[in-house]
Image (spheres, grey):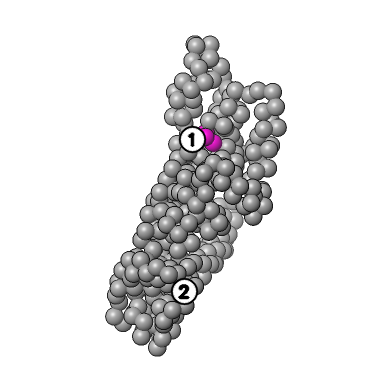
Amino acid sequence: MDNVIRRRTPAARCWRLALHAVLILAALFYLLPLAVMLITSVKPLDEITAGTLLALPQSPTLAPWAKAWGEACTGMRCEGVGGYFFNSIAIVVPAVLISTVVGALNGYALTKWRFKGSELVFALMLFGCFIPFQVVLLPMAQTLGWLGLSSSRAGLILVHVVFGIAFTTLFFRNFYVAVPTELVSAAKLDGAGFFRIFWRILLPVSAPIIVVSVIWQFTQIWNDFLFGVAFSAHDTQPVTVALNNLVNTSTGVREYNVDMAAAMIAALPTLVVYVLAGKYFVRGLTAGSVKG
């Protein structure tokens, strides 16, 4: 047996090296657009017009970043994307928090406080994950009009919360299925109520799935363009809409370095979130958010 293992070890090493090489090449290919964006964003405009996409900058500069943040034209206004960046933050933070909290409570109720028709309720919420966003644009616009939230940040927050609840409920419901029901039953016998059980028993073990929900919702809401362009006014538009307006503004010379810098600014929050919390996202998924 030892001789067989020795004979197979070099072949196994070769396969492992080949696999690693393929993965590295795939990663480099996947990261190539990001590298082009980053390199172009720190190049002077004359180097862009005279060089190639992958040529390193001879005189790196952050001037395109400064202009993209505070001076670039997004339509008729030349105020950069900075204000829209903060619009996105003002929309994303409450929408993520509310949808995560509501999803956690829904998942808890659908697994540990089952009621007649709970499976039907969950099936309908799951169905909501697959409804195309375009289908609900008109009904949602009418609803926001009735509530007096048209073209406001509050209206966009409501839209993202409504669409996020289906996903967060799915995450938490599938995670809480793995939590022993005996713990909840014992707490009920001791007189603990709905919220006390949730706070004392379910919430302390929910860190992995909370990370999954937060990262998922943050990414979906921050990168959203359709709802942002449909349900916002100029002063409440998210950064993705401003980026589109900047790139499509056709006044003067096309400044590719400014466009790329603006795209990097718009992408930085999601990149930071994945770099800092990506491993926890994977752990949360494997801890039960895609079970059942």
Numbered circle sitting on residue 249: 2
First to last magenta residue range:
100-104
Residue 94 sits above or below residue 237 on the image: above
Q: Is residue 17 above or below residue 216?
A: below
Is residue 233 or residue 244 the one in the foreground? 233
Residue positioned 56% across, 17% down in the render: 185
- The residue depicted at 49 percent of the width and 15 percent of the height is 192
**Residue 122 occupies quadrant:** top right
The residue that appears at 45% across and 65% down in the rendered structure is 243
Extreme residue toward the top, this view: 190
- Kindly identify the residue that appears in the image at 37 percent across and 69 percent down: 78
Q: Give, as a three-letter code, the residue at label 1.
A: Val
Q: Position of residue 180 (x, y in %)?
A: 56, 24
Q: In this rendering, which labeled residue sits more in front, label 2 or label 1?
A: 2
Figure check: 288 above or below 263: above
- The numbered dot on residue 188 is none
Q: Residue 130: x and y, percent?
A: 66, 48
Circle 1 SS class: helix
Residue 66 in sight = yes
SS at circle 2: loop
Specify the label residue 101 is tagged with.
Answer: 1
57 is within the stretch colored magenta: no
Nearer-the-camera pick, 68 or 214: 68
